[in-house]
Image (tube, grey):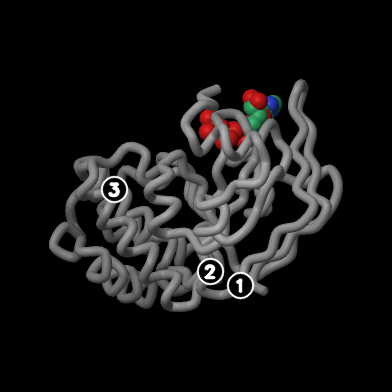
């Protein structure tokens, strides 16, 4: 396993997250579904080590967390792609070479010297992924990575995520897009008011959800 969590708990005023167990294998895509406010972002931040849990623990390899709108520096596309590597202590020239290669993979090599803030939303999403992948993480933690994208750009991101998983990386993907969950996910975790109420293989949970709350959510009847 490249990511494991046990007995995770965290309390905010009026909200308590409780995830007894979570495990991610290399090459696996875990989709986290749940209504707005159910704790998806909080779980991702705990898994990333950005929030300390109140109880329980998280263990695993190198993780990169991408928030819904990843911040980009007011620098070139290439500088942004190399930024994570510089933070990891990679020398500047080497970092730029590796970043160039990642930009090529995401189809942005022609824009390497453009200011990042001039990119379209779809290009910015791919740049954020290139920057994340450049540090060779074992686990990608993604918070609604295609929420602001049109279907064509969303599809390009999905292709990159599938490729990352095929390379052996683990992916935890919080999404509101049920079609995307079915297309990309192997395993599914459903959160409701901070509680992990159902988990299982994506196909099985979609075909026959066991918990009435998951059933209602998948029927589109739970919108809060
Ligand atoms: N730093 C914080 N301090 C206090 N409460 C917080 C904090 N972060 C999140 N919360 C609360 O925790 C609950 C879960 O929020 P979270 O953002 O994890 O949900 P979510 O499932 O990601 O929602 P959405 O789908 O809308 O992004 C919410 O009630 C939120 O208001």
Residue 212, above or below 171: above
Residue 47 rendering spot, x and y as whole percentages? 66, 54
| Labels 2 & 1 near each other (Cβ < 8 A) | yes
> Furthest residue to the right?
55
Looking at the rendered structure, which numbered label has been put on residue 28? 2
Looking at the rendered structure, which numbered label has been put on residue 25? 1
Please count the marks in the image. Answer: 3
Judge the density around disc 1: few (<14), some (14-19), many (≥20) Cα neighbours within 10 Å.
some
- Distance between the Cα atoms at labels 2 and 1? 5 Å
Residue 194, above or below 173: above
Residue at 38% over, 66% down: 162
Residue 106 rendering spot, x and y as whole percentages? 26, 64
Q: Mark 3 sits on what residue?
A: 124
Dividing the image into four equal quarters, which quarter contains ligand 1? top right
Residue at 72% over, 64% down: 4
Looking at the rendered structure, which numbered label has been put on residue 69? none
Where, quadrant-wise, is the C terminus in this rendering? top right
Judge the density around disc 2: few (<14), some (14-19), many (≥20) Cα neighbours within 10 Å.
many
Direction from residue 54 to residue 40 in the image, left or right: left
- Distance between the Cα atoms at labels 2 and 3? 25 Å
Residue at 33% over, 69% down: 99
């Amino acid at each position: 396993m490249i990511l494991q969590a046990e007995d995770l708990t965290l309390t905010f005023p009026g909200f308590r997250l409780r995830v007894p167990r979570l495990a991610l294998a290399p090459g696996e895509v875990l989709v986290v579904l749940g209504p707005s406010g159910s704790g998806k972002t909080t779980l991702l931040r705990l898994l990333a080590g950005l929030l300390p849990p109140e109880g329980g623990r998280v263990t695993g390899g190198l993780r990169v967390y991408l928030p819904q709108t990843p911040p980009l520096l007011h620098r070139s596309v290439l500088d942004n792609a190399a930024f994570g590597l510089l933070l990891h202590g990679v020398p500047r020239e080497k970092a730029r070479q590796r970043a160039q290669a990642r930009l090529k993979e995401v189809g942005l090599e022609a824009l390497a010297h453009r200011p990042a803030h001039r990119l379209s939303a779809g290009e910015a999403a791919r740049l954020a992924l290139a920057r994340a992948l450049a540090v060779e993480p074992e686990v990608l933690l993604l918070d609604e990575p295609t929420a602001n994208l049109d279907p064509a750009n969303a599809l390009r991101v999905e292709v990159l995520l599938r490729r990352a998983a095929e390379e052996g990386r683990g992916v935890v993907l919080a999404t509101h897009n049920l079609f995307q969950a079915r297309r990309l996910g192997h395993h599914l975790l459903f959160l409701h008011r901070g509680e992990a109420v159902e988990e299982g293989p994506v196909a099985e949970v979609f075909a026959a959800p066991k918990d009435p709350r998951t059933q209602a959510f998948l029927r589109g009847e739970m919108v809060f």
